[in-house]
Image (cartoon, rainbow, N blue to C red):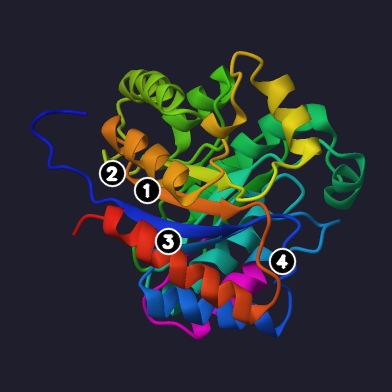
Amino acid sequence: MSDQQPAPKVRIGFGLGTSTDLHGPSYGAVVDALESLGFDSLWLSERISGPAPDPLVAMAYGAGRTERLKFGMSVMVLPGRNPVVLAKELATLANMSGGRLLPAFGLGAVDPIEQQAFGVQRGERAKLFDEMLTVMRSCWTGEPFTHHGARYDYDDVRVLPPATKMEVWLGGIAPSELRRIGRMADGWLPSFVTPDDAAAGRLVIEEVCAEHDREIEHDHYGVLVPYSFGPIPDRLLALLSKRRPDLSDPSELVPTSWDGLTELIRRFIDVGTSKFVVLPLAEPKGADAWVDHLTEAAEVLRPLETR
């Protein structure tokens, strides 16, 4: 981070996982609580075969009952969708919400059921993703565009643009993912990473940005931090052990207390990370429990934000 740039504003939002049960009226109560408590944003996960609500519908519903809360996807799957139709849908939501949309995209889960649902083979996803995002960027200029690619062909297509720039966030920490972020993204939101990972990944992204004569704003580096105040589920422990055999303590990736969560956030802030999405792995049960949890979270986490 350049010494000449002002310190980025720290903002904290909440995320919902793919197994959330907030797919009914209690979702509205949680949205209302996040708005009233002053949290920055709510991020919706996508899993066709899971209980989580469709992110586009849930974001539209939430934006319609709030005035300040931002809404993002963590993440919405691109391969398997129509890029022009999706670009129009997201531009409409961005405009109707007053620019409170934070679009974030991914390739999709490595899962046979999910692959059937989206109709895209695993080996096709990366190239398809890149072409789809290029098409969507063209849609959001508001100008007629022509595109002839490996999968999509358009001549003089024009889509209602968003009133403000659509800033696309991507996740991932693998070398290929970091390169894609440097080439195509406006923000970075990885998960299950350490502050050292974030610092190293940012250097790679900035190098790739320089190669392509572009930059990501210094306050558009974030992280999704899962936390669990009970035992970390065995399934997740096994996944973390496989994914990060170099880490002996799972709490380096998944804090297990408010103190641990705030300390980890402070360490991320020290390396220049400023946008945070915290995600409870063991969600409160019912609207009242959620509101109590968010009220406690606001007392602990919102003092970390900067004005």
Do residues under tags 1 and 2 come within 8 Å of each other at their CB atoms?
A: yes
Q: Residue, x 58% and y 22% (percent of image)? A: 174
For disc 3, the marked residue is 142
User: What's the CA distance linking mark 3 and mark 4?
Assistant: 27 Å
Q: Name which of mark 3 and mark 4 comes first in the sequence.
A: 4
SS at circle 2: loop
Q: Amino acid at mark 2?
A: Asp
Q: Name which of mark 1 and mark 3 comes first in the sequence.
A: 3
The image shows residue 32 at horizontal and vertical percentages of 49, 82
For disc 4, the marked residue is 54
Do residues under tags 3 and 2 come within 8 Å of each other at their CB atoms?
A: no
Quarter that holds the N terminus: top left
The image shows residue 210 at horizontal and vertical percentages of 30, 21
Residue 51, relative to residue 257: is it above or below?
below
For disc 2, the marked residue is 219
For disc 1, the marked residue is 275
SS at circle 3: loop
User: What's the CA distance linking mark 2 and mark 4?
Assistant: 28 Å
Do residues under tags 1 and 3 come within 8 Å of each other at their CB atoms?
A: no
Give the label, 4 or 1, closer to the camera. 1
User: What's the CA distance linking mark 4 and mark 1?
Assistant: 23 Å
Q: Residue, x 39% and y 56% (percent of image)? A: 12
Callout 1 environment at 10 Å: few (<14), some (14 to 19), or many (20+)?
A: many
Residue at the far top: name it.
246
The image shows residue 73 at horizontal and vertical percentages of 57, 56
Q: Is residue 154 visible?
A: yes
Do residues under tags 3 and 4 come within 8 Å of each other at their CB atoms?
A: no
Q: Amino acid at mark 1?
A: Lys
Q: Amino acid at mark 3?
A: Gly
Q: Is residue 160 visible?
A: no
Give the label, 3 or 4, closer to the camera. 4
